[in-house]
Amino acid sequence: MTAHRKTYWLRKKAPMKYVKRPIPIEAVQWQGKFGDPPQVKAPGPGHEHLVRPAERDVGVITTDHGDLAIRKGDWVLGPGAAGEYWPVAHEVFMQTYVPAEEAAAEDK
């Protein structure tokens, strides 16, 4: 599709609303500690530490989108469909996620 056709299509197409599919995901809140016992481990050989130190109370998680910072109190989510893990800020997590049992009760 050429750039002109694409912009024409975008101008003519009315916006639609979408809702993210309710897919259960595991999450753990990171307490800002490194070392033993590891709070968050990636599955697989050696169970490498998922969160690496960056600075005091700040860690780094390597994702498909590069290294992302995680701060004390933020959440680690995953594994996703491709086995990936990613950090989510505490405020965003609280606004976006509910425990699976709570979501199931709301659906009834």
Image: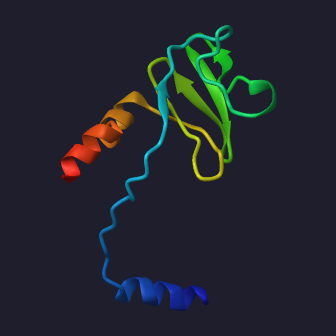
- x and y percent of residue 55 in the render? 63, 14
The furthest residue to the right: 45
Q: How many marks?
A: 0
Q: Nearer the viewer, residue 107 or 76?
A: 107
- Residue at left offset 61%, top offset 21%: 59
- x and y percent of residue 37 in the render? 64, 9
For residue 93, side relative to residue 82 (left or right) = left
- Residue at left offset 65%, top offset 24%: 51
Q: Nearer the viewer, residue 100 or 67?
A: 100
- Residue at left offset 61%, top offset 89%: 2
Colour mapping used in the image: rainbow
Q: Using the rendered view, name the quadrant where residue 15 is placed.
A: bottom left
- x and y percent of residue 13 in the render? 36, 85
- Residue at left offset 65%, top offset 31%: 61
> From the viewer's perspective, is residue 31 above or below residue 79?
above
For residue 68, side relative to residue 12 (left or right) = right
Q: Using the rendered view, name the quadrant where residue 58 is placed.
A: top right
Quarter of the figure that contains the N terminus = bottom right
Q: Using the rendered view, name the quadrant where residue 43 is placed.
A: top right
Q: Nearer the viewer, residue 10 or 81?
A: 81
- x and y percent of residue 99 in the render? 33, 36
